[in-house]
Image (cartoon, rainbow, N blue to C red):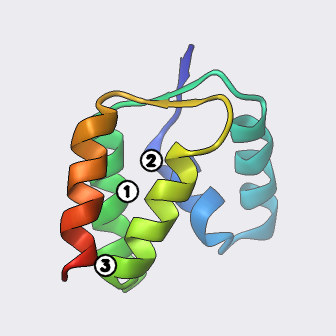
Amino acid sequence: MRAIDTNVIVRFLTADHAAQAAVARRAIEAGDIFNPTTLLLETEWVLRSGYRFSSEAIGTALAGLAGLPGVTVEDPLALASALDGMAGD
């Protein structure tokens, strides 16, 4: 299983740089990706503070990422709970 950097996830979710987003998409689509909780927390922070994503947009993005084939999250129940909490914001 491979772990990837927060920057890869952010490029994948925002597509703010076409060439880097394409590389990120290929890396994630190759599958066998492990996303530790710290990576998801960092990604949430970057999307909220740097990109001004709403809580709803962040929740949708992270849920979509976690639901991709070949993507595993460290603690699916904690992520689901956090996403449920974000939906109420």
Q: Between residue 18 and residue 64, name the one nearer to us.
A: 64
Task: Name the residue rendered at 30%, 49% in the picture.
Answer: 80
Sort mark 3 into few (<14), some (14-19) or many (20+) by Cα contacts within 10 Å: some
Three-letter code, disc 3: Ser
1 and 2 marks in contact (CB < 8 Å): yes
Task: Name the residue rendered at 68%, 70% in the picture.
Answer: 15
Sort mark 2 into few (<14), some (14-19) or many (20+) by Cα contacts within 10 Å: some
Give the secondary structure at mark 2.
Answer: helix
State the mark number for residue 6. Answer: 2
Give the secondary structure at mark 3.
Answer: helix
Task: Name the residue rendered at 64%, 43% in the picture.
Answer: 68
Q: CA distance from mark 1 to mark 2?
A: 6 Å
Q: As displayed, is residue 26 above or below residue 49?
A: above
Sort mark 1 into few (<14), some (14-19) or many (20+) by Cα contacts within 10 Å: many
Q: CA distance from mark 1 to mark 3?
A: 12 Å
Three-letter code, disc 2: Thr
**Mark 3 lies on residue:** 55
**Mark 1 lies on residue:** 43
Residue 18 in picture, x, y percent from top left: 79, 68
Give the secondary structure at mark 1.
Answer: helix
